[in-house]
Amino acid sequence: MRNAKRLLRSLSGEAIWPPPVWLMRQAGRYLPEYREVRAKAGDFITLCTNPALAAEVTLQPLRRYGFDAAILFSDILMIPWAMGQPLRFAEGEGPLLEPVTDAAAIAALDPGVVAARAAPIMETVARLRAAMDRDFPETALIGFAGSPFTVACYMVNGRGGGDFPAARLMAHRDPALFAKLIAVLEEATVVYLQAQVAAGAEVLMLFDSWAGLLPPDGFEAWVVAPTQRIVARMKALCPDVPVIGFPRLTGAAMPGYAVRTGIQGVGMDTTMDPTWAARAVAPEIAIQGNLDPLALVAGGRALGDGARRILAAVKGRPAIFNLGHGIVPQTPPEHVAELMAVIRSEG
Ligand code: 1CP
């Protein structure tokens, strides 16, 4: 039976026109209705672990724009949180974690508790699936996790906002220790993604936002190999669920990552030339991206020309329209409607 959902068709290698569209961070602070729920929830972790509110903010952008996918409202740092690493989101500062810096701290991390502690997140997925089957039957539900390397960056450094020198140094100075952390994260990620699929996620995405910080041998050891193992295990557990990888800022190494990890879709970051990627990535793998989030803030010509350039580049091959990174909070909501009109007028 042919699947009617446009996102799933692209991820099974079909070149559909116009391509399906969703936007990274499509639920978030640029939407007044999100800010309202966020204020009601109090802090960000409370929002992520409240199934009614997390499902509500996930659905908000679908009601406005009719995207082809919803992405679970949660965060990549909910895996370290579920393993017991102290985490908070400070206003204006982003995530703050108690850094994991030695063998004892890594040995204390238990992937076995992830399923139980993440149960409220799975309840969100289940609610979303029920609501979407009823109200958005053609929209696919994406579950996600951070890739082990990117999550390890935050766990070891304790915060974002830099280029994670402590994590990168640990990988060089004590690769056996760093490998243990990556192995724990692999295990936790498989458990966490499998639970999302069991609850109703139809597509999985692995965010590797900081993959581009690594030298080639590190990219191989800490990004390609762990992702390959996670994807292989997910294929064994749920063969019909496609996986999208997003190895951000990895340039010419991206097409090799896409083929070797066994994923069905690959994200292009803002810097990537989509015309190049359309040829360099294996033709059965959907390419996803990559409008500059700031072109969406600017609107007008920057938005229209930028979107049309990407559409022209990906025409005739499996693709998914998206941004090259997440929506920024100052994005005018009407510019997102403008973008949807540009994409749909190409159809
Ligand atoms: O104040 C708030 O409301 C919190 C802001 C916020 C939001 C809306 C954070 C904190 N996370 C999220 C949601 C989120 N994060 C989603 C689901 C919503 C959606 O996409 O619609 C997803 C998929 C993520 C993924 C995520 N979190 C990534 C990977 C993608 C990327 O942007 O590179 C990363 C690196 C994070 C860490 C994180 N969480 C939050 C912030 C501000 C950050 C970045 C920290 C930094 O600067 O390094």
Image (cartoon, rainbow, N blue to C red):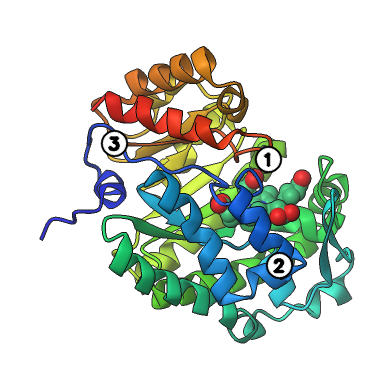
Observer-nearest of 263 and 2: 2
Q: Position of residue 108 (x, y in %)?
A: 80, 80
Against 149, is 269 above or below?
above
For mark 2, what is the residue?
40
- The residue pinned by badge 1 equals 329
Q: State the residue in front, 280 or 293.
A: 293
Q: Amino acid at mark 2?
A: Lys
State how far apart marks 2 and 3 are (Cα): 40 Å
Q: Residue at x 48, y 77 (%)?
A: 195
Q: Quadrant of the N terminus?
A: bottom left
Question: In the visual, does 131 lie left or right of 10?
Answer: right
Instruction: State the residue at coordinates (36%, 63%).
Output: 202
Compared with 342, 59 (above or below) is: below
Residue 26 locus on image (x, y percent)? 53, 47
Badge 1 amino acid: Pro
Q: Residues within 10 Å of mark 1 (few under 14, many from 20)?
A: few
**Circle 3: element type:** loop
**Where is mark 3, residue-wise?**
318
